[in-house]
């Protein structure tokens, strides 16, 4: 056995000698160049090729740069700001106020300081805001209870359990409410006056896409990746269109089309009558092969679709063909749904929050930064705007703030909030806390608005300047 193992040991010793010699040559490059020039040239060439390959791979996989599409920007369609409405009650029937989900109510006189009129409080989480129609607020809590509140008194008018898990706002249409549900996955139609269930339809997956109703058709997305159109009458499926991934955001409606993002990283335009996919545009993604995900509910204005993305960017697409006009990088996930507005005092602007704790005001035309301010913590939910003030709720410290749309000056802070900030009926704001709704009215009232009838004694503290009474 000893003789048979001699040759392998000899070969091993020779290999070790060669290895030591190679290491000495690498440590002394001049000697390597003199004694093994061919090997040195081959090694240098290999190193150059390797470094070049790494550079190319990095350039291909790194986070893409933001887009500034001059041709698409040239076709921007500014509009005159809508005239502020006189102080009177107006409806807020959908998540985002309008079918286009712009989340902006032009109204006079709704500004701090505010007095507290009433507060509704329950333990379940209120992740999405209520809607307002005809003197009543309608909402669904995280535990799946739908309820109605008298907007003047804060009194609960009815409550109905529709599921076990919910994260959406109702949609109102002709005295009926339409609500999608996560667990179990279904959509229900309720009588807005009584809360009675009129019909219920099972879905092929969970749904948290707040519906919009247009011409006797209710539209919403589902986590199975389909965008649905159901008849309001009996809940029959008019069409279902598969998109590029699970749909969590709410579709925006404008000009006969639905615009919605998906978790495959696509923004989609779908014909509202037929369900035909008109165009599908991609997102840039975080780099290194990843794709963005659209949780943010889009807003449609000025010939553009605006939305945030989980890759940390804000996107602006042309509504005609999906061309990407611009993108803007924030410092964190852009879950937040944007407000898009122009006023007498501020030009067309996109207001959006980010996980980085800031709110951004971006030029709606080219994505240039107008201003940014700290919201005080991570911004998860959509923003809203009433009058000349844009409101944001933050997750970290659970507060709500209001900033002047023109300058970014903070003029309001309230110690309640988490996901979504406020809605308005044109004379008050209704602020959503973690598990509460608070009615706030401008101090000393608003001209031409009847005095409210409080269920509780209004708080004496003012909410302007961060001195609100809890």
Image (cartoon, helix red, strand yellow):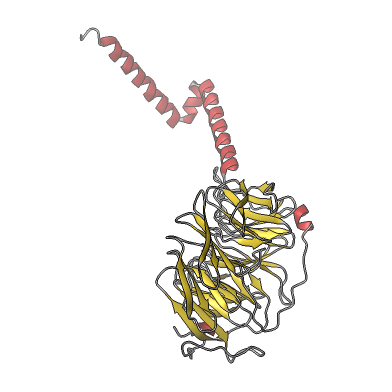
- Residue sitting at the far top: 3
- Which quadrant is the C terminus positioned in? bottom left
Residue 421 place in picture, x, y as percent: 54, 72
Q: For residue 102, what is the image quadrant?
A: bottom right
On-image quarter of the N terminus: top left
Of residues 255 and 362, the one drawn nearer to the viewer in this rendering: 255
- Indicate the position of residue 189 as horizontal and vertical percent values: 55, 62
Farthest residue to the left: give it.
1
Q: How many marks?
A: 0
With 303 as the anchor, is 148 left or right in this view?
left
Q: Residue at x 67, y 49 (%)?
A: 275
Q: Nearer the viewer, residue 416 or 447?
A: 447
Using the image as rendered, state which of residue 172 and residue 221 is in the foreground: 172
Q: Is residue 75 above or below residue 93?
A: above
Q: Residue at x 48, y 21 (%)?
A: 35
Residue 375 appears in view: no
């Amino acid at each position: 056995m000893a003789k048979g193992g001699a040759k392998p040991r000899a070969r091993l010793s020779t290999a070790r000698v060669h290895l030591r010699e190679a290491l000495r040559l690498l440590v002394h490059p001049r000697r390597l160049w003199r004694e093994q020039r061919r090997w040195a040239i081959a090694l240098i060439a290999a190193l150059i090729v390797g470094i070049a390959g790494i550079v190319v791979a990095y350039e291909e996989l790194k986070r893409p740069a933001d887009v500034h599409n001059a041709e698409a920007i040239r076709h921007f369609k500014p509009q005159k700001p809508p005239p502020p409405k006189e102080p009177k009650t107006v409806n807020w029937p959908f998540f985002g106020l309008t079918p286009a989900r712009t989340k902006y109510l032009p109204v006079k006189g709704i500004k701090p300081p505010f007095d507290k009129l009433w507060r509704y409080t329950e333990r379940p989480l209120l992740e999405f805001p209520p809607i307002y129609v005809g003197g009543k607020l309608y909402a669904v809590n995280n535990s799946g209870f739908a309820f109605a509140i008298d907007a003047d008194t804060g009194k609960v008018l009815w409550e109905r359990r529709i599921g076990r898990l919910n994260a959406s706002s109702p949609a109102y249409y002709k005295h009926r409410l339409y609500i999608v549900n996560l667990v179990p996955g279904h959509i229900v139609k309720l009588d807005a006056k009584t809360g009675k269930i009129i019909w219920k339809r099972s879905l092929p997956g969970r749904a948290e896409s707040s519906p919009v109703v247009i011409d006797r058709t209710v539209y919403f997305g589902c986590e199975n990746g389909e965008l649905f159109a159901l008849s309001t009458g009996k809940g029959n499926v008019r069409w279902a269109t598969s998109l590029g991934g699970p749909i969590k955001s709410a579709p925006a409606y404008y000009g006969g089309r639905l615009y919605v993002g998906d978790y495959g990283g696509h923004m989609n335009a779908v014909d509202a009558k037929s369900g035909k996919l008109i165009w599908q545009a991609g997102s840039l993604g975080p780099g290194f092969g990843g794709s963005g995900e659209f949780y943010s509910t889009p807003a449609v204005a000025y010939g553009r679709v605006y939305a945030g993305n989980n890759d940390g960017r804000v996107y602006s697409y042309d509504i005609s063909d999906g061309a990407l006009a611009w993108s803007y990088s924030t410092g964190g996930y852009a879950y937040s749904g944007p407000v898009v507005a122009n006023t007498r005092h501020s030009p067309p602007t996109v207001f959006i929050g980010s996980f980085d704790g800031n709110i951004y005001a971006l030029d709606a035309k080219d994505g240039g930064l107008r201003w940014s301010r700290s919201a005080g913590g991570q911004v998860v939910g959509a923003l809203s705007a009433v009058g000349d003030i844009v409101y944001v709720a933050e997750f970290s410290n659970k507060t709500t703030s209001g900033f002047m749309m023109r300058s970014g000056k903070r003029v309001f802070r309230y110690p309640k909030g988490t996901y979504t900030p406020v809605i308005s009926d044109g004379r008050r704001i209704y602020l959503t806390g973690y598990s509460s709704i608070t009615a706030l009215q401008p101090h000393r009232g608003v001209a031409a608005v009847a005095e409210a009838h409080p269920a509780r004694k209004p708080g004496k503290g003012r909410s302007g300047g961060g001195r609100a009474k809890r």
